[in-house]
Amino acid sequence: MSKKFIKAFIVSAVIASLFCTGGCRDGVSPAGDSKTEKAESPAQITTKELVYKRLEGKELACEVDMPAGVGPFPVVLYVHSWGGSLNQLKGYSQRMARRGIAGVRINYRRLSEGTEFADAKSDVEAAIDFIRGSSDEMNFDMSRFGMAGASAGAVLSSLICQYTPECKVFVAFNGGFDLLNKCESKFPGEQAAESMFPGVTEEKLRAASSIYNLRNNPPASLLFHGSADETISSEQARRFAEAVKNKGGSARLELYEGRKHGFFNSNMPDFENIAGKLESFLVEEFDL
């Protein structure tokens, strides 16, 4: 067993313990060439299991939560935390689907697989290409496209949405936006940073941090964060919101007093409150 694999395994275990607080769940097997469909009650939304990217010896799966009706539908891409899976944000995606907003939830490569940040970034980019390519078949309205990310998933999605012209909205759940000035956040630690960015430098961390790479008129942003989060400090969310406004965008920080990392997961007490605010935000921004 190589030293690189052992190192990646140890780092992934540490990160999973940080990011899975509050009930992240793994265990969804990637789909094969065929897709499966299943109806979800009570609104009879349909969930389709598909493959959005193929690698050598591996397929990356997504689940698409489709609203009832014919569309065209606004669509949101949901990116889980580094210790999560495509099930992590399922509750939000399916609730939004019942309101007429399609959701695409993806798995992407993680540190446990020897993954670097660039690998995960390319997976999320591939998911966007998949959504674009499926827009006619699925009846997605790409003029109403959004991205949502949890924890490290928000690190990825907050960056990628800046150079995705179709992206109209961005949502973060305890997200990270500055890997250089971490505001006393635990993530990423030195070992994790080296695994994510081999030969890590300030330049690499800056390039991966959305706060330094905002476009003019960034996507409208809604940020959920716990004030007691030690994994990623809420100060990062406050600074990101101000930066978005300074670039001509709109941003709102919903700060939950005393909540820690993972408080947004669907089995936690704040889920209904968060989901209601998310629904109101998307309905307004997508003009539903």
Image (cartoon, helix red, strand yellow):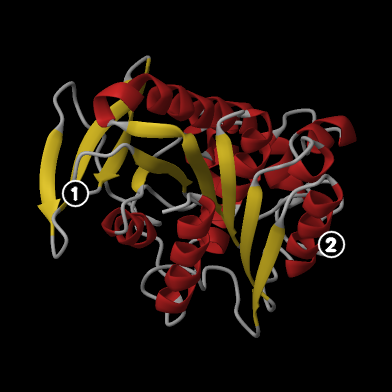
Q: Residue 37's x, y, as percent? A: 12, 40
Residue pictured at 48% horizontal, 52% vertical: 83
Q: Nearer the viewer, residue 132 or 114?
A: 132
Q: Position of residue 240 (x, y in %)?
A: 78, 55
Residue occupying the point 69% across, 53% down: 176
Q: Is residue 25 left or right of residue 189?
A: left
Q: Amino acid at mark 1?
A: Ala
Q: Quadrant of residue 174?
A: bottom right
Q: Is residue 5 left or right of residue 251?
A: left
Give the residue pinned by disc 1.
68
Q: Callout 2: helix, strand or loop?
A: loop
Between marks 1 and 2, how big is the CA–CA gap?
43 Å
Question: To which quarter of the image does residue 136 belong?
Answer: top left
User: What residue is drawn where x is 24% and y is 48%?
Assistant: 67
User: What is the quadrant of residue 226 in the picture?
Assistant: bottom right
SS assignment at label 1: loop
Identify the residue shown where x is 39% and y is 39%: 107
- Does residue 102 sit above or below 56 in this rendering? below
Q: Nearer the viewer, mark 1 or mark 2?
A: 1
Type of amino acid at the residue the image marks with label 2: Cys
For the residue pair 103 and 233, the one nearer the viewer reads as 103
Camera-nearest residue between 214 and 180: 214
Residue located farthest toward the top when viewing the structure as drawn: 56
Q: Residue 43: x, y in percent?
A: 16, 61
Nearer to me, 118 or 159: 159
Q: Is residue 199 left or right of residue 126?
A: right
Where is mark 2, residue-wise?
183
262 lies above or below 83: below
Q: The C terminus lies in which quarter of the figure?
A: bottom left
